[in-house]
Amino acid sequence: MDNNIPTFTPPVPTFTPPSNSGGNGNSCHFHHNERAVTVCAKCGKPLCQDCAETYQVAIGEYAGAALCYDCCQELVAENVQTLKKQRYSITINFIATIIGVIIGFVIGGPIGGAIGGCFWTFIKCFFARFFAGIKGGGFNLISIIVSFFVSFIIEAVCSIVRTIKKIASSIKHLIQTSGFIKSDTEALQNMKDYMEYTLIRSQNVGVDLATLMNEDSTLQNNAFAQNVLRNGEEQAEASIRNCVTSINENGEIIRNFAA
């Protein structure tokens, strides 16, 4: 047997498949076949033109700057959490007011109910008015009695107005806050659907949407893709811009809102 027969050793493959973890500095982190035109102002991810224009906020530290999908989602999620905390605070204040009205009504009828609805405000304003009356009328028994009854009557009447306004304001803020939570939560989902849509489309260039939706179960349940199919891409993209606008408007209100 000839021991000099040559043996063949196959070459080691040198091809490394592309990573799906993100783009390089010249391509978009999310859409790898799109050129990056800027970076996220918050985390530094490279972004394509569409990402740079889609995910922005108009207020706060990153107002007017390009944000990536992840960071924009994070900021909106923080808004939702803030709103939920505010709604909880408003609910507690509302319940406390109603309990005060009930206890006050049992003790002192309608006037007692009005006072009970804003009890601590009544106490503070009553004593401020009472001592001002004593000071103005002199420190004598008549001045004290007159100041007491005048102060009580005026503040009792004021309490009716205060309690009604307090209850109405609480109900209004509860409705508004719940509406903002619903709006921002829907906006989060719409942004997620849009990013999902753009990723699938960028990975399937040249394939029409109807074909993709038949082949990809993810797109079948994607609200943005369904909107494109019904109304066209231009109108669907306008709805995303409206989402971003509502997020910005809600964020402005959130920051100016006093629970």
Image (cartoon, rainbow, N blue to C red):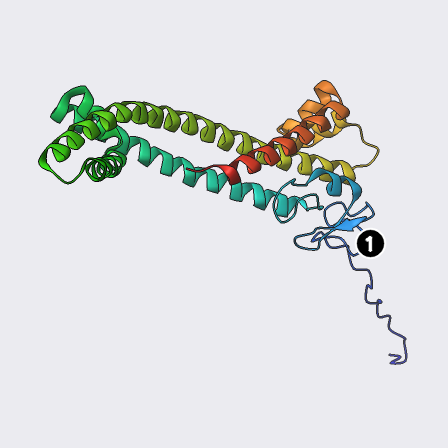
**Outermost residue toward the front in this view:** 138
Q: Is residue 210 above or below residue 181?
A: above
Residue 102 percent location from the top left of the image: 19, 26
Residue 113 rendering spot, x and y as whole percentages: 20, 24
**Position above or below: 214 against 72:** above
Q: Is residue 190 left or right of residue 198?
A: left
Q: Which of 107 and 252 lies nearest the eye of the viewer?
A: 107
Report the residue marked by disc 1.
26
In the image, what residue occupies the spot 71% across and 51% down? 20
Name the secondary structure under disc 1.
Answer: loop
Dot 1 alpha-carbon crowd within 10 angstroms: few under 14, some 14 to 19, many 20 or more: some
From this viewpoint, which residue is outermost toward the left?
A: 141
Image coords of residue 131 (percent x, y):
21, 39
- In terms of depth relative to the viewer, which is nearer, 137 or 213? 137
Q: Amino acid at mark 1?
A: Asn
Provide residue 44's location: percent of width, then percent of height. Answer: 70, 55
Out of 200 and 69, give the one closest to the viewer: 69
Looking at the image, which is closer to me, 94 or 66? 94
On screen, 226 above or below 139? above
Residue 214 appears in the rendering: no
Q: Quadrant of the C terminus?
A: top left
**Image side of residue 18 versus residue 97, left or right:** right
Picture quadrant of residue 54: top right
Quarter of the image where the N terminus is located: bottom right
The reply to whether residue 83 is in sight is yes
Q: Please identify the quarter of the rendering in which residue 197 is found.
A: top right
As drawn, is 41 to the left or to the right of 202? left
